[in-house]
Image: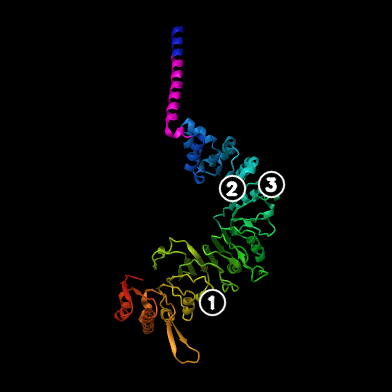
Amino acid sequence: MHPAMDDALRQVQEYVLRANAFMTKLRTLRNSSVHVNRVPTELLAEILCHAIPPSKRSDISLLNRVTHVCRHWRTVALDAAELWGTLWIDCPSDYDAFDESDDDRDELPSFIEEYLRRSKSYPLDVTIMGLNGTRVDDCIEVLQSHQHRVRKLRIQAEDHETMRSVLPRLSYMDAPLLEDLRLGAALPSYSIVYPPLIFQPHDLFGGHFPPLHSIYLSDVSLSLSAESNILRNLQHLILTGQGISITEMDTLFDILDRCPDLKTLKLHSSGLSPSTAPQHPSRTDRVVLLPSLRVASIDWEQSMVAGWLLTHLCLPETANLNVVLSRDDHLPVRASIRTLSSIRTLRIAIEEELLIQGYAHHNKPSFIRKSLRPTKSALSLCMRFHTEEEARDHFTHFLQAHRDVSLFSAVDTLTIGRGDFYLPDHWASLFEVMPGLRMLHVCGVDKSLSSCLAALCASDTARGQSVTYVRPRLAALQILEIQGMRGLQNEDSKAALTRAVRLMSMEGALQTLRLNGRSPWHAGVDAELLRQFCTVEITEVASD
């Protein structure tokens, strides 16, 4: 109807398109002039990889923000294969609705394929969590053509049935670059006893064993086999929730011998395995050297496993040892720990079970537990027994086993925590294994306080003589602190305290005596007499 008007509108549209193209070029030129965009492409890609560490690359929104900064950044980010090598496949709430639509079911595989395309040929770190059996199968199928570049594989199934379907798929997987394998099956909230998920190491990867450095299994039981090539040269062996027994200690020792670079060893049973004892090691003098070990954590239903490991493992002094020992008539607590000499602070307490905790460093010695918590314990032994007499008996044997070794030779601080650790005849054994003790803190030990104070001094009689020489058993002790002084109400405790303070200050290194408690409990202590020998600090507290 109006040709002239149509031509004018067409020209205006062309001018607008040209203007938009011109503005785009101007923005591109302006962005190119920014200092960060003058950086070479390879260097910018390296900066992006450092700005987004591998632990955060599973957050797709964070990666998307990088690609939406500008065209140049998007090009560089999409071309940086390292950024897309960490593939985290989770089950967020928005995926729950995908079950209703066939189109939605394709969303997850498409998401994985896009990640795989962007990662090019870079090694893959794959994590699959919270998906049901069908979804896990779909994910593994998509990964099938890229299995040759999988470096880390972590699968956390939502139930045992899902993991049962996953294990056969792994037997056909060929992953020559795989270094880290983590498998876990979530336990149901209701109490149903499921048979343990057990697989043989030689069934994995079609017999083509990758150079694994780390194996982490949770509620998936691994059958320990000395012939398995997959259990070689490991740096981390973590088995938790294990539902099968260890039948031969020699097999376990053979596996550890083939892992000289092992840094982490954790063996935790699920409590469902029978408590029958495994076969004894063929050699009682066998030593398993693990010079690189940093963490050893043993909580096994078969108590003798922990005892033999303590006996035969040679631990470096920098290792952290955490052992839970359950009640067992055959518990070999008498055996000693071969090497672990970095302990500076030792804490002994009864809190439903007997706790022995050693720390490599300490800040300010105190009875407050949180003062010891900031430093990770180098030694943690938890002995679970029915009665205090059982705990006392096994602890006595434990001390006797370490009488001639250097496990506690470097301890300079000993804290006896709350709970009356009644050792009337064995305080001397406790002190003798710590000859360099400089600080002793006793808290809440009322029944045996008199025995404790008496054991601070030793009586020696020379052969052929009737003269008895009394000497301080802890000649290096500088600070003695007692908190909760009900035990000082009887005359024997007061006399033992006076005698120990006098002797250790005159023939030893004692400098300070600290008494913490309510006023009536220390009113009978002759502070003026004690101040003749050392500094006496009395602190009244509201409660012990």
Q: CA distance from mark 1 to mark 2?
A: 46 Å
Residue 455 left/right relative to 329: left
Depth check: give the residue in front, 120 or 516.
120
Label 1 SS:
helix
Front label number (3 vs 1): 1
Q: Which residue is mark 2?
A: 152
Q: Nearer the viewer, residue 521 or 21?
A: 21
Numbered label attached to residue 172: 3
Q: Over which residues does the magenta segment extend?
A: 12-39
Mark 2 secondary-structure assignment = strand
In-front residue for pair 57/136: 57
| Residue plotted at (65% across, 67% down) | 278
Q: Height in image: 181 above or below 466?
A: above
Q: Does the magenta-highlighted stretch encompass residue 28?
A: yes
Do tag 1 and tag 2 residues touch (Cβ < 8 Å)?
no
For marks 3 and 1, give the CA distance.
53 Å
Q: Residue at x 47, y 92 (%)?
A: 465
Q: Is residue 353 visible?
A: no
Which secondary structure lies at badge 3? loop
Query: Is 59 rendered above or below residue 24?
Result: below
Where does the image place residue 153, in percent across and percent down from the top left? 59, 48
Q: Quadrant of residue 312?
A: bottom right
Q: Amino acid at mark 3?
A: Tyr
Q: Quadrant of the C terminus?
A: bottom left
Identify which amino acid the numbered label 1 is placed on.
Gln
Say which residue label 1 marks.
400
